[in-house]
Image (tube, coloured by chain):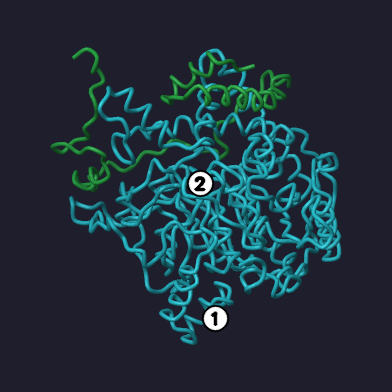
Amino acid sequence: MSGLTDLTVAAAAAKIAAGEVSREEYGAAWREAAAGDGLNAYLWKDGDGTPGAGDWTGAGESAPPGEGEETPYGANAPAPAESGPLAGVPIAVKDIFTTEGIPTTAGSRILEGYVPPYTATAVRRLGAAGARVLGKTNMDEFAMGSSNENSGYGPVLNPWDRGRVPGGSSGGSAAAVAGGLAPAALGTDTGGSIRQPAALCGIVGLKPTYGAISRYGMIAFASSLDQCGPLTRDVTDAALLLGALEGKDPLDSTSVGIEGGIELPGRENLAGLRFGVPRELGEAALDPGVRAVFEATVARIEELGGAVAEVSLPHAEHGISAYYVIAPAEASANLARYDGVRYGVRKGGDGDLIEMYETTRSEGFGAEVKRRIMLGTYALSSGYYDAYYGQAQKVRTRIAGDFDAAFGDVDFVITPTSPSVAFGLGEKTADPLAMYLNDFFTVPVSLAGVPAISIPAGLAAPEGAAAGAPELPVGFQIAAPAFAEQKLLEAAHALEGALDFAGQVGDAAPWRGGGDA
Amino acid sequence: MIDRDQVLHVARLARLRLDDAEVETMAGELSGILGHVDRISGLDLEGVEPTSHVVALENVQRADVPWTSLPPEVALANAPEPFEGAFRAPSPQADAD
C-alpha cells in the first residue's frame, strides 16, 4: 500500500492544499486501491464509466430563481469546486444517494440499471467542498439490515476476517474505509446503520442529529429516522466531513443544519464533562468481551478527568419493539413507489396493472424488504393501527423523554455500540429477530433523534471462539443532546487520543495491510 | 398469532405476491417479531402524546417563483415503457376490456 493512502483525510487535504501532494497522484492512489476491492464493498467505481451520464444540469431550461432561492432539483445548490476543505479527496458514497449519471440501486434488484437525473444534496455538498465520488458502496437492500447480507448484489466481507459480516446497512462504506479501499465514506443511519458497521469494522461512524444534514436525494427508508453521516478512520475526519455536509437545504424542509457549523476538534482531556452509563446496561445481553472493553473505556474516561454517573433510560429496552413497528410502517409507505411504472425494473407487463405491480414487486424485492413491507402494512392496517403504530409512537415519546431527563444530569450517554463483535456470515440470517437485536443500543438514540458517534475502543475475541482466535474490534457509543455535535466530537477526540486504537492494533489494522485485507 | 389468511390479506394490501412456502415462512416470522413487539402493548401510555417527528418544525412555504423542472425526456429516461411523452402502464381495467 502506498504512503498516500496511509494519510487521514485531514492530513491529505492539508498536504494537497500546501502543494506537498498532487491531487492527481492522491486520486490515482485511491482509484487503484478501490480497483483492488476483494470485499464486494463497491457496486460502482470511478473508472467504471457512466452509462447514462446526462448533460442536464437544471440550468437554462427556464428562468432560474435568484441566488439563494430554492430550486427543485439542485440547480441552485453548490456546484463542484476545485478548492475547499476536501479539495482533491475522493470519497466512497453509499449507493442510497442519488448521483447524476452514476447508477444508483440502494442495494436492490428493483433499481438495477437506474441512473438518476440529479445528485443528492449531501453528495453535492461534498463536491462543493472539493471532494469527488470514488465509488458507490454496497449496502443492505434499501438500508434494511445489520449485516449487509440483504444486498441484492451479494454480501460485503469484513476486512478483519472475511468469514464475518461488516455490519449493516452501510456495510460497504465501513468495509471500504477499514479495508483501505477509501479514505472516508458516506453512509446513512436509520436505527444504527452507520454506527454498528463502523463498530464491527473498527472505524469511526457518526450519526448526526436528525435534521443536521439534508435528506434530499437520499433514497427513503423511514423518513422520520433516516439521517446521513460520515464513516472515517478517525474523529477529526468525521468532523471535517460533517462540517462540509451539515446545513439547511431548501430542498429538504426538515433540514435545519447545525448552528455555528463544525470545527476540527482539539480537546485532549475530559475534565468537567459528565458521562452517564444507563443502569439498564447491567441486565443487557452483551458478550463478555464487549463488556470488558466497555468497562475499560469507562475507566479511561475517568483517568482523563471525566465524571461517570449512572443514568436511567427505563424505556430504552422497548426501543427495538417501537422501532420495528415505526420503521417498517414508514418503509411500507415509502416503498410503494417501486411499482414498475416510472423507473426501475418492470416485470409481467402483459397482464393487468395489479398483476404487473405484484409481479414487479415480488420479483424485485428481497426477502427482508418484503418482510418489513408486510410488517409495516400490517401495523398500519385497519384494526391494528392504534395497537401497534399508535402505541409505538407513544413509546417513542417516552424514550425521547428518557434521554431528555438523562441529559439534564450528564453531558453524554455511553453504551457499547453493538452487543457483539462481527458475527459470521450466515450466522443470524435464519432468525430475523436475533438480527434485529443487534440494534439494541443504537435504536433508542435514533428514536430520540439525537446524535451519537461510535469509536473503536479495543479488541475482543468472538464469544465461543477457540483460544487464540483473532480478536475483533469493539465499538464505543457516545450520544449527546440534539445539535451538540461539536461537544460530542471534542469528547470523542479526547477519548480517541487516550485509547489510541490505531496504535494498539498497529499493522494488524486491515487498512495497513493486516487483518484479512 | 398471524395466520395464513392474514398474511394473504396483508400481501394483497402491499401488492406483493407470495407463494405457498413464502406464506408459511412469513406467518412464522411475523408472529415471532410481533410476539416481541407485543411487549409494548401492556405499557400504560394513556394520555402520552405520540411522536411522529423529533425536530420541532413549522410549516414551510417555498417562494412563489418559476423554476426549472426535469425536461420530459430526462424524466422519462428511466421509464420501463415511455410512450409519447408519458409513462405507459397496463390498463387498470384489463379485465373489463
Q: Position of residue A378 (x, y in %)?
A: 54, 21
Q: Chain of mark 2?
A: A
Q: Is residue A212 visible?
A: no
Rendered-image quadrant of the N terminus of chain A: bottom right
User: Which residue is painted at 62% across and 54% down in the image?
Assistant: A166
Quadrant in the picture for residue A269:
bottom right
Q: Nearer the viewer, residue A201 or A38?
A: A38
User: Which residue is painted at 69% across and 37% down in the image?
Assistant: A434
Up the image or down, B95 lies above or below A256; here it is above
Rendered-image quadrant of the C terminus of chain A: bottom right
Q: Are marks 2 and 1 in contact (CB under 8 Å)?
A: no
Give the class, few, some or many, for how many residues have Cα within 10 Å of label 1's Cα (few <14, many ≥20).
Answer: few
Q: Which residue has dot 2 on it?
A: A151
Up the image or down, A353 lies above or below A112; here it is above
Q: Which residue has dot 1 on it?
A: A2
* Helix, strand or loop at mark 2: loop
Q: Position of residue A62 (x, y in %)?
A: 18, 50
Q: Residue furthest front?
A: B21
Q: Please tell me the colour of chain A.
A: cyan
Three-letter residue code for mark 2:
Ser
Q: Please tell me the colour of chain B.
A: green
* Helix, strand or loop at mark 1: loop
Q: Chain of mark 1?
A: A
Mark drawn on residue A287: none
A277 to the left or right of A162: right
User: Which residue is painted at 47% across and 25% down in the image?
Assistant: B18
A40 to the left or right of A127: right
Up the image or down, A20 lies above or below A216; here it is below
Q: Nearer the viewer, residue B97 or B49?
A: B97
